[in-house]
Image: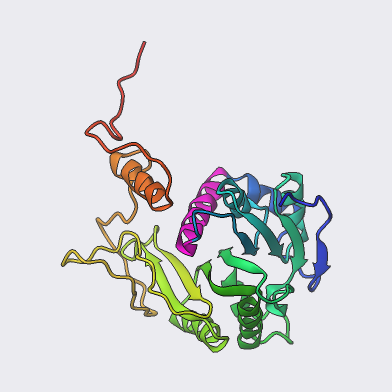
């Protein structure tokens, strides 16, 4: 489904988190683009979409459409919603392939029941824990969001919401309202032993309870993998631990090839030359 090219319809309050200058700065920052693309790729992978057909996805907090770009590259169609008109203007200038809607997710998902095959959200849901107005109640806004999202998703689908919880209470509030709305699932924490690379993905199931996907970089001392994390308010520093492989290194190349294999793509076999640096030619 190609983008309609229409100006996003407004279905939310007038408050905006980004002005035009901030929106452009955010969407042009190479580091932010790389991080966003990486998290989007991981979120789509966690959706567990079928390989034999294109799916229709919802991107909550789509911003300038960086996540949507990866969704389109994977052959899927999408609709993005965001509260910031400035960010959506940038998305339109970038000519993203998805359709866009200006809306406040705290007021609910404005789509008919069973419309989407899945939902992704990158760094957005935690904002619902803030009371930006006197009339805002975080628990009520979270429940409104999750209950209408549950309705908009097809039975058997998933919602993968990447977020940055400030503390264990905030994380408990978010997951509690999701379960109250009817979702099952839990938290997948990638690289839990890394202060910088740690990423939280709330993996939610609609209708049927499934096993949580395996977390990345969560190898325990006994060689097994852990998909759960213990949340405390105590700030802890980890030393001499790299939760994420150095970019372009052999481990980084092998991890990327393994992700591609899990997605059903054709990947060259690993050899002793995989990820090996080539000598410069003069």
- Taking the spot 73% from the left edge, 45% from the top edge, the residue there is 95
Displayed quadrant of residue 187: bottom left
**Where in the figure is residue 45, as x and y percent of width and height?**
46, 58
260, 128: nearer the viewer: 260
Which residue does the image show at 34% across and 74% down from the upper left? 229
* Residue plotted at (32% across, 56% down): 243
Question: Is 195 a magenta residue?
Answer: no
Decide whether residue 47 is among the magenta residues: yes
Q: Is 4 positioned to the left or the right of 56 in the image?
A: right
Q: Position of residue 230 (x, y in %)?
A: 33, 78
Give the residues drawn in magenta, as a range.
30-48
Most frequent secondary structure within the magenta stretch: helix
Residue 149 quadrant:
bottom right
Q: Is residue 219 left or right of residue 88?
A: left
Residue 184 position in % (x across, y down): 47, 81
Position of residue 147 relative to residue 226, above or below, is below
| Residue 165 vertical placement versus 250 (above, below) | below
Q: Is residue 112 left or right of residue 223?
A: right
What colour scheme was applied to this rendering of the protein? rainbow
Residue lying farthest to the top in this orientation: 282
Q: Is residue 200 left or right of 157 when viewed as pictured?
A: left
- The foreground one among 117 and 123 is 117
Asked whether residue 132 appears in the rendered view, the answer is no
Whether residue 143 is visible to the viewer of this picture, yes or no, is yes
Q: What residue occupies the far left of the structure in this picture?
A: 222
Q: Residue at x 21, y 66 (%)?
A: 224
| Residue 54: % across, % down | 59, 54
């Amino acid at each position: 489904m190609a983008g309609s090219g229409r100006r996003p319809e407004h279905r939310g309050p007038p408050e905006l988190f980004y002005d035009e200058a901030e929106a452009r700065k955010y969407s042009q920052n190479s580091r932010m683009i790389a991080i966003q693309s990486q998290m989007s790729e991981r979120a789509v992978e966690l959706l567990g979409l079928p390989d034999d057909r294109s799916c229709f996805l919802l991107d909550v907090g789509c911003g300038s459409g960086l996540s949507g770009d990866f969704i389109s590259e994977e052959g899927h169609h999408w609709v993005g919603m965001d509260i910031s008109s400035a960010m959506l203007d940038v998305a339109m200038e970038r000519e993203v392939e998805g359709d866009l809607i200006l809306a406040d997710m705290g007021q609910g998902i404005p789509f008919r029941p069973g419309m989407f095959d899945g939902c992704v959200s990158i760094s957005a849901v935690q904002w619902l824990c803030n009371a930006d107005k006197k009339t805002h109640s975080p628990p009520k806004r979270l429940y409104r969001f999750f209950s209408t999202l549950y309705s908009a998703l097809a039975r058997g689908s998933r919602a993968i919401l990447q977020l940055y919880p400030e503390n264990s209470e905030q994380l408990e509030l978010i997951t509690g309202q999701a379960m109250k709305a009817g979702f099952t699932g839990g938290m997948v924490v990638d690289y839990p032993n890394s202060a910088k690379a740690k990423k939280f993905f709330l993996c939610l199931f609609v209708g049927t309870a499934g096993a949580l996907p395996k977390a990345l970089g969560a190898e325990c001392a006994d060689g097994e993998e852990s998909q759960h994390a213990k949340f405390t308010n105590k700030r802890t520093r980890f030393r001499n631990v790299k939760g994420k492989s150095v970019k372009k290194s052999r481990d980084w190349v092998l991890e990327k090839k393994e992700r591609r294999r899990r997605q059903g793509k054709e990947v060259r076999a690993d050899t002793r030359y995989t990820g090996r640096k080539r000598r410069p030619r003069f």
